[in-house]
Image (cartoon, rainbow, N blue to C red):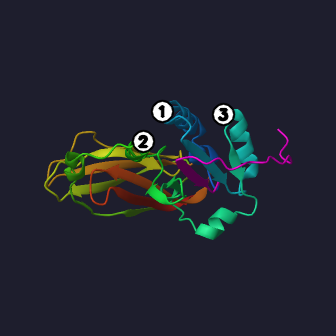
């Protein structure tokens, strides 16, 4: 691959565009999720008849790791390596990956926000909009209310070879069953276990987060929980020093 080559990209007018920004800071493979993007793009090509294009913009923070991952995963779709990180500077994207993906209409207006790779409900929403399907009234009403007892947990200082755990509790304070649709972590060193059964009104769901460091580091990891609640997205965080 000639990384110095210039490729002319001509804008293609489509009914919808999925714009995805990746900062490439930290664990590149965890953030890129290229195999899943390959699957999504192929699915869109099969159902949208060319009415949807995906534009993925990468910051140059870890260009070497990015190019390596693109090659390993044989990613052949168009990507843009923004050498000056201009897109981010113009839009001031948040650090959370969840809010760096947008579904745009033909006039480049935002019609939906969220990462369809990390959240199956977001993917479902994108596909419904693209295919012109409206949400049913029962889907709109099937939500509950929640309360998070503790959203940030410090694991303190510990030997980096140790495995550490933290437990978060989400209480269903509404009058409908609470269902966890998906959980995404900001890095592969963090995993989450939780019951798949719905929580009845008044009950809680416990999420057990496990952190295993690859090397000594100060860490600040985010766990994003998607559920049928208002709000539908819950951000949890663990931090500490693996020494």
Which residue is painted at 67% across and 53% down in the image? Answer: 58
Which of discs 1 and 3 lies nearer the camera? The answer is 1
Residue 153 placed where, x, y %? 40, 62
Q: Marks 1/3: CA distance?
A: 24 Å
The N terminus appears in which quarter of the rendering? top right
Whether the residues at callouts 2 and 3 have beta carbons within 8 Å, the answer is no
Instruction: Locate the C terminus by quadrant.
Output: bottom right
Crowd rating for badge 3 (residues with CA inside 10 Å; few <14, some 14–19, many 20+): few
Nearer the observer, 77 or 149: 77
Residue designated by label 3: 73
Residue numbers of the magenta segment? 1-24
Q: CA distance from mark 2 to mark 3?
A: 25 Å
Q: Name the element at disc 1.
A: helix
The answer, for residue 214, to whether it is visible in the render is: no
Element on which disc 2 rests: helix
Say whether marks 2 and 1 touch (CB < 8 Å): yes
Circle 3: element type: loop
| Earlier residue among tags 2 and 3 | 3
Question: Which of pointers 2 and 1 lies earlier in the amino acid sequence?
Answer: 1
Which of these two is toward me, 155 or 50?
A: 50
Mark 1–mark 3 CB contact (< 8 Å): no
What residue is shown with label 1? 47
Residue 56 appears anywhere in the view: yes
The residue sitting at 19% across, 46% down in the picture is: 138
Closer to the camera in the image, 202 or 15: 15
Magenta: main secondary structure? loop
């Amino acid at each position: 691959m000639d990384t110095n080559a210039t490729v002319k990209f001509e804008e293609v007018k489509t009914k919808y565009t999925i714009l995805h920004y990746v900062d490439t800071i930290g664990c590149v493979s965890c953030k890129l999720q290229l195999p899943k993007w390959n699957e999504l793009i192929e699915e869109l090509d099969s159902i949208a008849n060319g009415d949807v294009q995906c534009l993925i913009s990468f910051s140059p923070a870890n260009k070497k790791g990015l190019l390596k991952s693109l090659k390993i995963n044989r990613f052949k779709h168009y990507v843009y390596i923004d050498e000056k990180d201009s897109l981010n500077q113009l839009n001031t994207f948040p650090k959370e990956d969840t809010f760096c993906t947008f579904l745009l209409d033909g006039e480049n207006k935002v019609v939906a926000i969220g990462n369809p790779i990390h959240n199956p409900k977001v993917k479902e929403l994108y596909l419904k909009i693209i295919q012109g399907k409206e949400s049913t009234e029962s889907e709109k009403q099937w939500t509950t209310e929640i309360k998070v007892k503790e959203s940030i947990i410090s694991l303190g200082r510990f030997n980096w070879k140790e495995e550490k755990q933290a437990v978060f509790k989400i209480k269903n304070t509404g009058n409908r069953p609470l269902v966890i649709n998906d959980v995404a972590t900001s890095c592969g060193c963090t995993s989450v276990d939780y019951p798949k059964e719905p929580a009845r009104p008044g009950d809680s769901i416990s999420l057990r987060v496990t952190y295993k460091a690859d090397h000594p580091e100060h860490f600040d990891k985010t766990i994003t929980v998607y559920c049928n609640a208002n709000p539908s997205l819950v951000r949890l965080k663990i931090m500490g020093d693996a020494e």
